[in-house]
Image (cartoon, grey):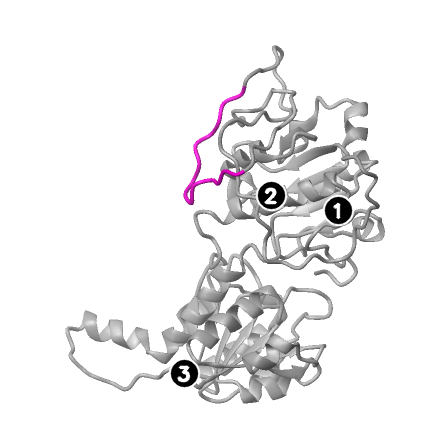
């Protein structure tokens, strides 16, 4: 299925001051189409525009360009299925941004000329499910992208994007950090409540028509330990504080800001993970998966947890020693676990995690709201506005660190 706006080789105008609906959008129409069939194009936008108020993310250094006083042209290739509904937001790109091709396979770009390949200076990787693109596609495109300056991923994790040639290059990589933080934080605290209120027991009694009152637990005054105190971790801490939880964060920087002091944040140095594990009633992991975080939550760390402790993972499954976690859950040495991510995804049918009654499993969809990809593309549109104005990009990835 071709995107309805493919074929219009015109630039895109931003209509300021409007905002898009919270639900899925209807597609706009194009003014002109090329006579010959072609998938490469820019998209002509009419009508709706996104709200371009700043996102909450801090601007990170990494792609700094002098302000020359005039905007540059962004010539963009998009690695995504042409039917991805979030591509409706391409209508909101600034007028000096041109989309030259959209697709999630090489065939989609087969009619680009050498001159057009040479003109591409920005790449967007987005889409989910059948509209997703792959690292393999980007690697295949890479030799043709001789003048690319910037690649953006509409995902917070970039382990499925980076490869050695990209890492060694001077091409800036940005991600969607911050776009999914609140939904993941909600899921993390919901998981804590799942165990605090013993919801499986409540549902079992209801199903059995059994009126059997039992004691429940408050989250108030419980200690919430957070491993990975970035956007997701801080959003989780904010909701945890609303429940009256005490927040302990693991991070390299132990100095507290004025706001963190007022919030009562306690920081444990990153080389004292077991101290956080033993202190916390609930542990939330929100780590990217890199060589430095691989199985960071080790057997020893899990063993350090309280017997009443609950482990929640909204980061990446590879950051946990999963066999050790399963053993702890089976033996009852920890109370339970809530996992939105696992070491292997999809989770194999023979995984013991499926059958453990003290495990809450989510198929890596805790942030998959109806608007999550719209919000990620909206964030990217703001990035394009910065790019054409020679401003520093937000969410610049440290390619050597992997996040």
Label 2 and label 1: CA atoms lie apart by 23 Å
Label 3 and label 2: CA atoms lie apart by 39 Å
> Relative to residue 205, is residue 273 drawn left or right?
right
- Point out the frontmost of discs 3 and 2: 3
Can residue 103 be seen here? The reply is yes
Q: Residue furthest top?
A: 35
Q: Secondary structure at mark 2?
A: loop
Point 53% across, 77% down: residue: 325
Q: Position of residue 1 (x, y in %)?
A: 51, 27
Point 55% across, 89% down: residue: 279
Q: Secondary structure at mark 3?
A: loop
From the viewer's side, name the closer residue of 122 and 63: 63
Query: Do callouts 3 and 1 mark residues in contact (Cβ within 8 Å)?
Result: no
Q: Give yes or no for residue 378 being in the magenta stretch.
A: no
Q: Which residue is mark 3?
A: 220
Q: Position of residue 192 (x, y in %)?
A: 42, 75
* Most frequent secondary structure within the magenta stretch: loop
Which quadrant does the C terminus fall into? bottom right
Label 3 and label 1: CA atoms lie apart by 43 Å
Q: Which residue is mark 1?
A: 391
Q: Which residue is mark 2?
A: 126
**Mark 3 crowd level (few <14, some 14–19, many ≥20, 10 Å Cα):** few
Q: Quadrant of residue 106?
A: top right
Q: Position of residue 344 (x, y in %)?
A: 57, 61
**Mark 2 crowd level (few <14, some 14–19, many ≥20, 10 Å Cα):** many
Relative height, residue 51 to residue 219 (above, below): above
The residue stretch that appears in magenta: 17-30
Relative height, residue 314 to residue 111 (above, below): below
**Label whose residue precedes the other's in the sequence (2 or 1):** 2
């Amino acid at each position: 299925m071709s995107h309805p706006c493919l074929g219009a080789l015109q630039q895109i105008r931003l209509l300021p001051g409007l905002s898009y609906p919270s639900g899925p959008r209807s597609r706009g129409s194009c003014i002109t189409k090329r006579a010959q069939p072609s998938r490469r194009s820019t998209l002509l936008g009419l009508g709706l525009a996104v709200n371009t108020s700043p996102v909450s993310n801090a601007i990170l250094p990494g792609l700094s360009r002098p302000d020359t006083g005039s905007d540059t042209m962004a010539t963009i290739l998009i690695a995504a299925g042409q039917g991805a509904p979030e591509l409706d937001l391409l209508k909101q790109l600034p007028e000096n941004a041109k989309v030259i091709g959209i697709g999630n396979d090489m065939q989609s770009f087969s009619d680009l000329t050498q001159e057009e390949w040479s003109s591409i200076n920005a790449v967007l990787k987005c889409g989910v499910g059948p509209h997703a693109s792959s690292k393999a596609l980007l690697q295949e495109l890479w030799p043709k992208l001789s003048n690319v300056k910037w690649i953006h991923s509409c995902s917070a994790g970039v382990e499925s994007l980076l490869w050695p040639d990209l890492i060694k290059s001077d091409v800036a990589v940005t991600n969607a950090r911050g776009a999914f933080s609140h939904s993941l934080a909600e899921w993390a605290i919901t998981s804590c409540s799942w165990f605090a209120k013993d919801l499986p027991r409540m549902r079992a009694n209801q199903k059995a028509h059994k009126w059997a009152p039992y004691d429940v637990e408050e989250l108030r005054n419980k200690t919430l330990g957070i491993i990975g105190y970035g956007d997701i971790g801080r959003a989780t801490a904010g909701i945890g504080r609303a429940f009256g939880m005490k927040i302990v964060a693991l991070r390299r920087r132990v100095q507290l800001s004025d706001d963190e002091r007022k919030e009562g944040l306690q920081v444990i140095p990153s080389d004292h993970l077991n101290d956080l594990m033993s202190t916390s009633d609930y542990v939330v992991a929100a780590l990217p998966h890199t060589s430095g975080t691989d199985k960071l939550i080790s057997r020893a760390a899990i063993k350090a947890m309280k017997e009443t402790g609950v482990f929640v993972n909204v980061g990446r499954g590879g950051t946990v020693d999963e066999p050790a976690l399963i053993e702890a859950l089976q033996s009852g040495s920890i109370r339970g676990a809530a996992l939105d991510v696992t070491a292997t995804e999809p989770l194999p049918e023979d995984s013991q995690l499926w059958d453990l009654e003290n495990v809450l499993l989510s198929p890596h969809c805790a942030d998959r709201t109806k608007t999550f990809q719209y919000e990620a593309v909206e964030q990217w549109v703001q990035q394009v506005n910065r790019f054409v104005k020679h401003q520093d990009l937000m969410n610049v990835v440290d390619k050597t660190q992997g996040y």
